[in-house]
Image: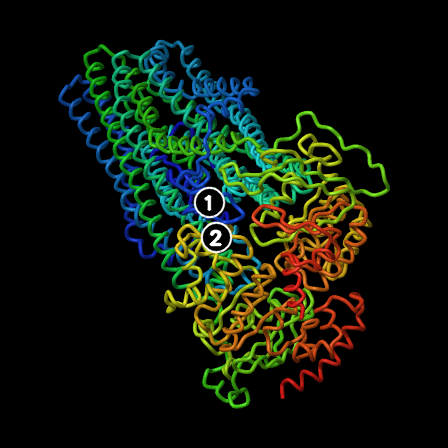
């Protein structure tokens, strides 16, 4: 709920703390505390110390945060102005009360005594109008500002989502899923709170200050000046609190992020935790992290207590001083009694919201930190950009769907340096099935990802029927090339929907045909609701092998010219693998295919084998020729035959 | 007034909040003192206008400078006391409430770690996490704020109205008029608001799911070029959320308009009436000023009751969510009904090794009448023997392995280790005896060495080396800090094969008496696989092991093989025997010679098998 705009004793609302305890400042939830990155073959070799990814601090150009905020608000200028005007009017109406009280006492009373009811009617009507006005303007303001806020959030959420989707895989591999999720959830949430509650309150408080000071100055310059002067120590207090709280809150959100990471990791790995009796060790670890958060949390609460004492003290002293002086002057006859009354009423209102000011500053700071992170994310440019002037693939000439793929002088290195694939040439004729083998880290997956345009080559180009992949827009590209990876992720929804991802317009018959072709039909039919089974409800019990079959069916349905399979059968049992292979005999017929597998059985259906080592293609030939030879492949193949026993 | 309202509005939410008592009890003295201090401070605020009244009617009217000084001094003292009391209240509760939050979180974590795996299968970790973080923060805020201030504000309002009525009962009554409609309107809006707010929360949850899947499934989305449809789905959801939020804002605008306008109207009436009375001489100016000043001071407590109640409502929901998890029974360490002494009676017939006796298993959340995942499993693995478990995808192999360390509890039958029923063993000891490598090799964010040594507390550096050697995890040496290298988010910075090898090392590091391996070599290339197998053979020689296998190469690690089909043991024998006797087995191992859809094949398979089972049990 929101808190009141104007009044409030100790109106510190929800204790000022829950607000950004959601851990949204430095590290969002689900984010690991980056302790160091690993030199794994799959990822570029970088050290955490100088990697902006490692510290979750993507560089944003200076002023990007402000520019982002402006660009979000710019097209809604009209509404923003309207909201500001409404707030101005609302404050005017609600702050007029004491002025009317002064008028009632100084004018209304004598006039009434003289038999003139006019001023009294004016008092009644004026107060009535102000009361209704403040309610009505408040109503209008909330509605208008909600429109602005929601439109801004809609816009921002969309931007983050689309941008994240457009960013290339190498970005995703380094940024980690948790961060992206927290950018689009908790960071947006902190802006939502600022826009929805904090900013309105902050502006309200400032406006109230200005109005009331103006009123006091109008009533009496001396009293007004004294009130304005009291802002100086208040301002200093706010600044001190802001600075100290910033430090404490920063520590606290780091502490809660560590708690969250530990918590999430334990729950996601509950099987090994229990099987290896980690419960007690985990309790101890968790206790330490939890305790650190408890200390910081207590510190933050105490900081608030200090601020409350300080600000109340200043405010109450100012009230006492002003009353003393004003009363003196009333006694002297230099000040009207009504003015004293009005001044006292105003003073109460003036200092009421200062407690909450500290809270709003926190919410502002945390939103600013979030916006900075979002701006940093949005400043990333996709390393695999969409074609600016897309071309289409030439029409298929033959009856087969396959197309020719050419690596023309291609080499690939990570942006951070470290060459993965030295310059090479490779032509895969239309309709050929190529198996790529080699040990982990030989560059097989990189080759495949280049062909699927998950990465762009550092130099050279990759041509599909003579057209550079970079010149194809996404739909055209995916009609050309589809890649099935080892990790068979299922989206929430039904099994049928998951398969249909390959071709959204596919009919149920198409979907079932694809599933049958790959040998997935049997287990899908056995699920409680068959093809309409929700995978999230039973997702935990769809085995790894079954998930891979669904992924396969999806790829079949997509019906691409070039099909890339990257370790796509690792979790299948032998019959499953066989079924897939049988299916591929027909499916791959006339289609261009690149298959990466450490199970050499796949190789049997290939027309051609490439053996890779240290980023180079070291052997290239038909399976028969290579097996007959004495090269690496012959050795691997022999080892594999032996393993079949 | 407010408490009774809360009580009648929703008695069950009061009851859920009462469950917090055990956590609050240790800090009750401080909490109640704080509430008392807040009441005193709040009432002090009401004395301000009285002092003003005295000043206006007394010293100011009489031009008594001494009196004015006295009044101002009184105000100053009151002000300082008020400031100190408010600060004191916060100081009193700051550390204790942080402590309550931490204690509840620690309890939740402790409890969750000890809940059965079946529970975790049902509950997404995000749900548990939100209970452990945002819900608990909300509860801390509830204890710090609404709980205290419902009491404080109610007292303040009561005292305030008493003061008002004492000063001028007719004006006081005028001011009391709006209280009734306000409370009614607020609770009306509140109940509608709660519904819309909950809908908004659900929609945020849906949105988070799409975001999460959009990130986790990015390879698939990119692989199939599905950005646009994802974006459209996302857009539709955000639009729906926006609509709900706007509806929320409309209700909120209504509440605020009413809350701001109605008390002001009453004050307007009081002002007009008061002015007339002052003009008539029936009322002093000072009294009118004090009266209006008190009325203004009461505005906040009145307005706040609406949202204090809303916060209490939310806190009640948070409490329910917290205890929903805490109320789930932890697993009993030793199965009920069977006294440990009773078990010894079974022992002689069992003999050594790992033995499944008539074991059946059905997931706890499955319908009572449904077919069990595993049914009447009888297996005996001799001490030192290695048995492979082979079966088609979804036949229940992985489930079978989860029963041994009691990650799931058998529904019927029993499993014995060296003749001792595992259901009668403390889990701690059981899991010391049994070591597991899972199909999904999960690592934790710790160093490589720590991850491996999780398998055995007593193991030393030598044991670590040996385990890494067995798993052929030589790549560890090439990592920046060797075994001291941190593995990141769930070990995702390592490749699948590397993670699998570390998980295997973890399983063997403590030289366990019993070893359970679930398809431990699936992500390895042929070369590495051969090396691991050779090393693993040495380890298996010394332990009793159950190995789930998909491939002949893995099966060959075992002395005997059990074929699982449709949740039952279809056949037991050596690899060669089963190749000859079981069609299904031959099919699973070679993938040929059998029509995959043929049910008849599997039936005959299990018939030939039953002979083999009897033979194996001997």
Instruction: Point out residue B192 in the picture as x, y percentages from the top left corner.
Output: 57, 40
Q: Residue at x 52, y 36 (%)?
A: A415
- Left or right: B534 as drawn, with respect to A229: right
Q: Which residue is mark 1?
A: A29
Instruction: Point out residue B266 in the picture as x, y percentages from the top left corner.
Output: 44, 27
Q: Which residue is mark 2?
A: A264
Spatial CA span between label 2 and label 1? 9 Å
Q: Residue furthest right?
A: A399
Position above or below: A214 against B581: above
> A106 or A600: nearer the eye?
A600
Q: Residue at x 19, y 16 (%)?
A: A328
The picture quadrant where one finds residue B289 is: top left
> What colouring style does the render use?
rainbow
Chain letter, disc 2 residue: A
Instruction: Point out residue B109 in the picture as x, y percentages from the top left corner.
Output: 43, 57
Marks 2 and 1, the one that precedes in the sequence:
1
Which mark, residue B461? none
The picture quadrant where one finds residue A478 is: top right
In the rendered image, is residue A231 in sight?
A: yes
Instruction: Point out residue A598 in the picture as x, y percentages from the top left corner.
Output: 63, 57
């Amino acid at each position: 709920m929101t808190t009141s705009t104007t009044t409030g004793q100790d109106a510190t609302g929800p204790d000022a703390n829950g607000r950004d305890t959601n851990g949204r400042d430095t590290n969002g939830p689900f984010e690991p505390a980056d302790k160091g990155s690993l030199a794994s073959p799959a990822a570029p070799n970088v050290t955490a110390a100088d990697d902006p990814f490692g510290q979750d601090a993507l560089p944003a150009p200076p002023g990007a945060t402000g520019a982002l905020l402006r660009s979000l608000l710019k097209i809604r200028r009209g509404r923003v102005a309207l909201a500001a005007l409404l707030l101005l009017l609302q404050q005017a109406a609600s702050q007029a009360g004491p002025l009317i009280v002064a008028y009632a006492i100084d004018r209304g009373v004598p006039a009434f005594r003289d038999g003139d009811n006019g001023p009294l009617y004016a008092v009644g009507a004026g107060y009535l109008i102000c009361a209704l006005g403040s309610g009505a303007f408040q109503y209008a303001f909330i509605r208008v500002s909600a429109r602005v806020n929601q439109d801004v959030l809609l816009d921002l959420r969309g931007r983050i989502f689309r941008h994240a989707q457009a960013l290339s895989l190498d970005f995703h591999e380094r940024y980690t899923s948790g961060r992206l999720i927290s950018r689009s959830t908790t960071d947006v949430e902190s802006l939502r709170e600022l826009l929805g509650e904090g900013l309105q309150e902050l502006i309200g408080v400032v406006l109230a200050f200005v109005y009331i000071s103006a009123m006091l100055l109008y009533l009496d310059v001396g009293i007004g000046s004294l009130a304005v002067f009291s802002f100086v120590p208040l301002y200093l207090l706010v600044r001190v609190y802001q600075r100290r709280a910033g430090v404490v809150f920063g520590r606290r959100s780091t502490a809660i992020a560590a708690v969250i990471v530990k918590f999430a990791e334990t729950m996601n790995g509950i099987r090994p935790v229990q099987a290896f009796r980690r419960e007690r060790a985990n309790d101890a670890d968790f206790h330490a992290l939890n305790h650190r958060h408890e200390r910081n949390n207590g510190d933050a609460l105490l900081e608030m207590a200090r601020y409350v004492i300080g600000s109340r003290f200043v405010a109450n002293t100012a009230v006492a001083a002003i009353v003393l002086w004003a009363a003196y002057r009333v006694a002297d006859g230099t000040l009207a009694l009504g003015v004293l009354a009005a001044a006292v009423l105003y003073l109460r209102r003036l200092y009421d919201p200062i407690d909450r000011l500290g809270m709003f500053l926190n919410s502002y700071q945390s939103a600013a930190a979030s916006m900075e992170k979002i701006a940093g994310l949005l400043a990333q440019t996709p390393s695999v950009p969409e074609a600016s002037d897309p071309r289409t693939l030439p029409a298929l000439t033959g009856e087969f769907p396959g197309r020719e793929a050419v690596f023309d002088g291609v080499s690939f290195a990570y942006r951070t340096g470290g060459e993965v694939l030295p310059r090479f040439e490779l032509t895969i004729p239309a309709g050929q099935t190529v198996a790529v083998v080699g040990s982990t880290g030989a560059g097989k997956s990189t080759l495949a990802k280049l062909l699927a345009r998950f990465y762009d080559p550092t130099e050279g180009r990759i041509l599909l029927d003579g057209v550079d992949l970079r010149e194809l827009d996404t739909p055209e590209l995916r009609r050309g090339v589809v890649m099935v990876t080892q990790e068979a992720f299922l989206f929430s929804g039904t099994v049928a929907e998951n398969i249909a991802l390959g071709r959204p317009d596919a009919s149920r018959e198409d979907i079932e045909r694809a599933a049958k072709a790959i040998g997935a039909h049997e287990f899908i039919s056995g699920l409680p609701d068959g093809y309409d089974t929700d995978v999230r409800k039973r997702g935990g019990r769809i085995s790894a092998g079954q998930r891979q079959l669904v992924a396969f069916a999806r790829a079949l349905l997509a019906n691409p010219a070039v099909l890339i399979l990257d370790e796509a059968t690792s979790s299948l049992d032998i019959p499953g693998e066989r079924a897939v292979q049988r299916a591929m005999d027909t499916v791959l017929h006339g289609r261009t295919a690149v298959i990466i597998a450490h199970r050499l059985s796949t190789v049997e259906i290939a027309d051609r084998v490439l053996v890779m080592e240290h980023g180079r293609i070291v052997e290239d030939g038909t399976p028969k020729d290579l097996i007959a030879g004495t090269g690496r492949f012959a050795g691997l193949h022999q080892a594999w035959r032996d393993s079949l026993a | 007034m407010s408490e009774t309202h809360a009580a009648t509005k929703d008695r069950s939410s009061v009851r859920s909040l009462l469950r917090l008592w055990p956590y609050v009890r240790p800090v009750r003295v401080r909490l109640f003192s704080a509430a008392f201090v807040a009441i005193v401070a709040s009432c002090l605020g009401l004395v301000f206008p009285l002092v003003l009244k005295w000043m206006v009617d007394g010293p100011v009217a009489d031009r008594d400078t001494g009196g004015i000084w006295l009044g101002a001094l009184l105000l100053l003292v009151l002000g300082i006391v008020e400031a100190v009391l408010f600060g004191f209240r916060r100081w009193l509760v700051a550390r204790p409430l942080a402590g309550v939050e931490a204690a509840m979180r620690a309890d939740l974590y402790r409890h969750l770690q000890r809940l059965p795996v079946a529970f975790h299968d049902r509950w997404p970790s995000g749900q548990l996490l939100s209970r452990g973080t945002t819900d608990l923060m909300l509860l801390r805020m509830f204890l710090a704020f609404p709980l205290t201030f419902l009491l404080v504000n109610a007292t303040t309002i009561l005292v305030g109205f008493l003061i008002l009525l004492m000063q001028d009962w007719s004006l006081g009554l005028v001011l009391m008029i709006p209280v009734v409609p306000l409370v009614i309107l607020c609770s009306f809006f509140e109940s509608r608001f709660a519904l819309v707010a909950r809908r908004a929360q659900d929609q945020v949850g849906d949105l988070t799911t799409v975001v999460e899947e959009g990130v986790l499934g990015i390879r698939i989305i990119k692989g199939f070029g599905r950005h646009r449809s994802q974006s459209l789905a996302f857009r539709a959801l955000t639009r729906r959320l926006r609509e709900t939020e706007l509806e929320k804002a409309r209700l909120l605008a209504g509440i605020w308009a009413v809350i701001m306008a109605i008390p002001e109207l009453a004050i307007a009436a009081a002002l007009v009436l008061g002015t007339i009375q002052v003009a008539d001489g029936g009322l002093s100016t000072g009294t009118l000023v004090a009266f209006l000043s008190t009325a203004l001071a009461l505005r906040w407590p009145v307005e706040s009751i609406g949202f204090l109640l809303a916060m209490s409502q939310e806190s009640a929901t948070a409490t329910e969510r917290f205890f929903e998890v805490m109320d789930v029974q932890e697993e009993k360490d030793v199965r009920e009904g069977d006294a440990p002494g009773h078990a010894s009676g079974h022992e002689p017939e069992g003999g050594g090794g790992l033995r499944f006796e008539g074991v059946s298993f059905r997931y706890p959340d499955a319908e009572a009448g449904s077919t069990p995942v595993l049914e009447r499993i009888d297996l005996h693995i001799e001490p030192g023997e290695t048995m492979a478990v082979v079966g088609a995808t979804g036949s229940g192999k992985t489930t079978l392995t989860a029963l041994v360390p009691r990650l799931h509890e058998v529904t019927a039958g029993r499993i014995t280790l060296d003749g001792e029923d595992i259901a009668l063993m403390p889990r701690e000891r059981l899991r010391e005896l049994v070591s597991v490598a899972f199909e999904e090799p999960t690592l934790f964010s710790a160093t490589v060495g720590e991850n491996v040594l999780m398998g055995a507390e007593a193991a030393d550096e030598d044991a670590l080396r040996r385990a890494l050697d067995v798993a052929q995890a030589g790549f560890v040496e090439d990592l920046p800090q060797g075994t001291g290298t941190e593995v990141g988010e769930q070990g995702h910075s390592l490749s699948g094969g590397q993670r699998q090898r570390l998980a295997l090392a973890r399983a063997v590091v403590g030289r366990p008496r019993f070893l359970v391996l679930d398809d431990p070599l699936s992500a390895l290339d042929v070369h590495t696989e051969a090396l691991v197998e050779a090393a693993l053979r040495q380890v298996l020689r010394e332990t009793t092991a159950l190995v789930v296998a998909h491939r002949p190469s893995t099966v060959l690690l075992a002395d005997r093989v059990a074929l699982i089909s449709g949740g039952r043991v279809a056949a037991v024998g050596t690899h060669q025997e089963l190749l000859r006797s079981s069609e299904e087995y031959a099919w699973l191992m070679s993938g040929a010679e059998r029509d995959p859809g043929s049910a008849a094949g599997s039936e005959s398979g299990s018939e030939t098998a039953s002979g083999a089972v009897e033979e194996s049990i001997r």
